[in-house]
Image (spheres, coloured by chain):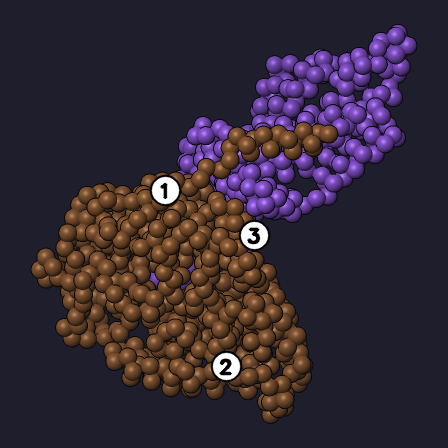
Chain colours: A brown, B purple
Amino acid sequence: MIRKTLAMGLVALAALSAAPAAQAQNIRIGLREDPDILDPTLARTFVGRIVFAGLCDKLFDINEKLEIVPQLATGYRWEDPQSLLITIRQGVKFHDGDTMTAESVVYSLTRHLTMQGSFRRGEINSMTSAEVVDPQTVRVRLREPFAPFVSQLTDRAGMIVSPRAAEAAGRNFGNRPVCAGPMRFVERIAQDRIVLERFPEYWDASRIHINRVTYLPIPDNTVRLANLQSGSLELVQTIEPDDLRQVNRNSRLRVSVSDELGYQGITINVGNGARAQTPMGQDPRVRRAFELAIDRAAINQVVYEGQYTPTAQAVPPSNPYHARSITAPARDVARARALLAEAGVRTPVQVEMTIPNNPDLRQVGEVIQAMVREAGFELRLNAMEFASSLQAATRGEFETYLLAWSGRADPDGNIFTFIHSQGPQNDGKYSNPEVDRLIAAARVESDQARRAALYEQMWRARAQDLGLIYLWHRKNIVGHTTRLTGFVPVPDGLIRLQGMRLN
Amino acid sequence: MWAWLLRRIGQIIPTLIILSFMIFGLQQLMPGDPALILAGEERGDPLVLQQIREELKLDRPIVEQYLYWVGNVVQGDFGFSWRIRMPVTDLILQKLPVTIQLATMSFIIAIIIGVPLGILSAVKRDTATDWAANGIALFGISTPNFWLGIMMILLFSVELGWLPPSGYVPLWEDPVQSLATTIMPAFVLGTGVASVLMRHTRAAMLTALSQDYIRTARAKGVSEKSVIRRHALRNALIPVVTLGTIEFGRLLAGAVLTEQIFTIPGFGKLVVDAVFNRDYPVVQGVVLATALIFVLLSLIADILYMAINPRLRQA
């Protein structure tokens, strides 16, 4: 009776409220988590970049083919391999009404490079200085030739902030960011919403049809999808592969699937402390046996509905530097057993794998556990909360670590950091002089074909001693209402508002 | 009685000091280096890590870190969130109204369901009504919040389209929409608490009904309605009030899972996200604020006892 009364109350309340229809050209975007600080210099989360796509334009952008296209810059030219000339777009206004000048560009680049706690420094630390050449031109000097430099300016390191606003706000700039993007900042309620509104003086205003964007962090996959299904959101950042079928059945929703820039892999501790002193850590044959015991396509089928792309390299097929000749080896248990016998290790070989505590990754771990058992491995799974697992990895407190990388447009961003012996996130301390040499050579090679050839050679050299087993490239699965048109998926997974419209 | 009240309030200060030790100390036991988390994809750069540690005083001895924190807290400064750089005080003040609204609504739902059901099942002991009431309570206790929450979203939002599936609208911005966004989470939380209240009301009522004074009242010819309302219920309510304030305090501490499911930006979600991001100032601030709420609530409960039970006033 009481429940009935309450249920009736609910009905009455619902009739009163009937969720307000989205008003014209106001869109609501569901994010997987709450972004961190909205200061391009201090920000570090992926979801934050989605908000920046509406808020802060960059010197350059990338398109769906991963080509570098001009944005706040109109072009660039290498004077010599250590000196880059960038031409600046004229008449660009910041959200505070100031005009963007060559000085603002120099200011922002210098801020990214020198501000205390900057997360951009790592991306542009080959830069020594930036200077104004004339009102249309900025020169950037590099310490050494660095082919990926322009590509770094297609992300946060290329975002130009209003110097006046940045100086006034100091370290609190992120609470009220002032940039030159299509939308300006309205408000932010932590963990609830970030609201942006159309900036009428945007330099490329004719391509912006959206009046207001609200970004809503909704961490639960089911609930995020329910919001899309019930019309409370116009677009969601990610849909899980196992929800795809359900979404495809809904005629009012559309999904757009594209390759992401990064990869999922297993990092092996081969030289980071005592935990590297295992058969897996010390003998490349054991590592190759482990790889041969895994059937990537089958795991992908079981856990991800076959959506992801099996791989044996860090760069996805959509990237021009993807080496077609490098393919994932097929599962071969007999060969794996033979390799273990050749290595002369006692079976079952004991291996521990650290797994960030997500349902899908735990499932991946369980399938791998079953697969490698047949080849003579006894795999123990160690599911850990993400923050703790990162710390364990850095300290070398792991044998193998199932870790994904969101990826960068330039291949160097997927490679150097992880498998070069000096790479800052080479947690397993993998070191192979030939691999190091080829990575370094590719870094300074500006010819695309020659650079791609160097990477291909590097993958071959690396396949012999495997510090990292690449598993697959994931997909960006964006879902939106069919009322929304003009969304263009780009492999970086960002949601660009240009051209988007609600019908 | 005033002396008692003063003494009672005096106890709060040492409680809070001990609490501040515990909050700070337990946090040090959490695995996961905050600098590493904050550094994110730059975590391999020792320069970045060192800079973060210096800025956040993570390189100082723990005692110094503690004194620095307490010193600021005493002056009303809870520091700023390491992750989003907003002052913790602002965050708490932003979330507190949300949590208070949700907690109050849940509590009202809990009382409306729990107390009458408890009385009913005690008065109609061992009848079908009693069993039905117990059945409802069992369902309320044993249904996981996240499951009930998702089921409600699927039914009321996705299938029927009556209520928004998640999110929050402040009460003063749009009261109707605000109720629409909080009614489902309040119901999910309320049913859980209702079951606890129901069981306790029932037990307390059964005890009260078996007392001598009830028999005397009945013998005097007092109507059954009056016996139950004036004599039994008033006495039975004392333990229920205690429990009620504790449950209300728990609701105010934030309902982690429920807030997460319905994306309600309250205390629970704030503290959980802060823990996962090792955002220590937020964790410390929220836990301390929650502790303060608990301490105040238990004070209120004690004062309420006196109102309900005159015998305590002489003590």
Nearer mark to the viewer, of 3 and 2: 3
Tell which tag, 2 or 1, sits nearer the viewer.
1
Q: Is residue A280 left or right of residue A120?
A: right
Q: Residue at x 46, y 47 (%)?
A: A233
Q: Which mark is residue A328?
A: 2
Amino acid at pointer 3: Thr
- Residue at disc 2, secondary structure: loop
Q: In the image, is A242 to the left or to the right of B44?
A: right
Q: Which mark is residue A24?
A: 1
Q: Which residue is disc 3 drawn over?
A: A222
Q: Nearer the viewer, residue A238 or B301?
A: A238
Instruction: Check if mark 3 and mark 2 are on a common chain.
Output: yes
The picture quadrant where one finds residue A344 is bottom right
Q: Which amino acid, mark 2? A: Ala
Residue at the (37%, 64%) spot, across then down: A490
Q: Residue furthest right?
A: B219
Location of residue B40 in the rendering, given as x and y in whole percent from the top left corner: 42, 59
User: Mark 3, residues whose alpha carbon is within 10 Å: few (<14), some, or many (≥20)?
Assistant: some
Q: Secondary structure at mark 1?
A: loop
Q: Please, is residue A266 above or below residue A6 in the view?
A: below
Nearest to the observer: residue A325 or residue A15: A15
Q: Amino acid at mark 1?
A: Ala
Q: Earlier in the sequence, mark 3 or mark 2?
A: 3
Can residue B27 be seen in the rendering of this structure? no
On the rendered structure, is A350 left or right of A142? right
Q: Chain of mark 2?
A: A
**Label 3 in the same subunit as label 1:** yes
Q: Nearer the viewer, mark 3 or mark 1?
A: 1
Residue drawn at the location 52% of the way across and 46% of the way down: A230
Please give the chain letter of the residue carrying mark 1: A
Q: Earlier in the sequence, mark 3 or mark 1?
A: 1
Q: Quadrant of the N terminus of chain B?
A: top right
